Amino acid sequence: MKIENKQKMQKLQKVQKIGRNVRPYAYIFPILAILFVFVGVSLIIGIRYSFTKYNLIGVPEWGGLYNYKKMLGDTKLHQAVKTTVILIIFVVPAQIVLSTCFATLIAKRRNTILGKLAKAAIFIPVLSSSAVVGTVWKAILNGNNGLVQKFFHLFGIEPNMLLGSSTTALITVACIVVWKSMGYYMILMLSSVLSISDHYYEAAKMDGANGFYLFTKITLPMLKPAIILNFFLAVASGMQIFDLVYTMTGGGPSMSTTTLVMYLYDLTFKSGKAGYAMAISNVFFLVVVGIMLLQRGLMKKETSEL
């Protein structure tokens, strides 16, 4: 009887051990199933249709590597990529610099009413829909609001032409993108600033360090991991800009604001070239994955150094 009871206890312990090992996976199974259905299956379908001539209506026709070869000579694709890169070059540094500066200033006044109001005011645009923000800014710049026109006339700028000229449309869109999303990166940076121990600043002040020295020698080095994270997040976000540009300019004038994602949208739903759009999306996906892997590697390196 003792031997039988011992065997039963061992079996029960094994079952309990298996249950403990399986339980965490059971908790995340629902979200994994959703991701597999809506992301994994979509990715598999996209890879399959990227080798076909498909227009969302007819039967896909096998085309082999035709869609991938076509990318090399597609001038519109090259223009969309160029526009996206220019947008990223302008937006990302502005977001990093402004978010770092505002986070540092707000951290110093975090317990004051002014600091709390500033944090809320900067973050509110992040909560707004990009489509709504684009529509509102388009109405402001293209409307006949006398106050807005007088403000821009002070700088010799005609507001109606900011979105109507190919030379200023992209810069205008970039400025609004920075205004819209800067609060998100500011909050991430603010959490990192607040995590820096006051002992570093107190020791430096005892040695006679001024504010500039504290910022450049203590704050910035300690913020390096956060800056790297924000940089890659901003790059990935900049590569996916669509709704804000779509509602403001529709990609015009003369494709001057047509981003890569907007070009994919036009190919799929306006030109009936869904197969070609999926081929471009697959290459685009690999680029984004490469950027994320690079960011992960740099983050590990910086964390280990700290």
Image (cartoon, rainbow, N blue to C red):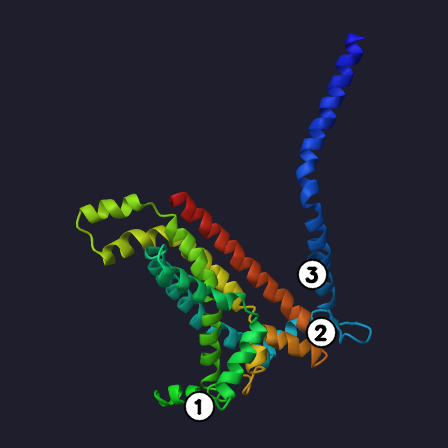
Query: Given this view, does label 1 or label 3 mark the residue nearer the observer?
Result: 1
Give the residue displayed 80% in from the left and 76% down from the top: 57
Query: Given this view, does label 2 or label 1 mark the residue nearer the observer?
Result: 1
Above or below: residue 28 compared with residue 55: above
Task: Name the residue nearer the viewer: 98 or 11.
Answer: 98
Which image quarter is the N terminus in? Answer: top right
Q: Disc 3 marks which amino acid?
A: Leu
Task: Name the residue nearer the viewer: 138 or 41.
Answer: 138
N-term mark: 1 or 3? 3
Helix, strand or loop status at disc 3: helix
Q: Position of residue 284 (x, y in %)?
A: 59, 66
Q: Disc 1 marks which amino acid?
A: Gly
Above or below: residue 218 compared with residue 164: above
Above or below: residue 216 compared with residue 138: above
Q: Position of residue 190 (x, y in %)?
A: 40, 56
Looking at this rendering, what residue extends furthest in the front direction?
Answer: 113
- Asked if residue 260 can be seen in this view, the reply is no
Q: Position of residue 125 (x, y in %)?
A: 49, 69
Q: Disc 2 marks which amino acid?
A: Ala
Residue 274, numbered label: 2
N-term mark: 2 or 1? 1
Task: Name the residue nearer the viewer: 9 or 267.
Answer: 9
Q: Which residue is mark 3?
A: 43
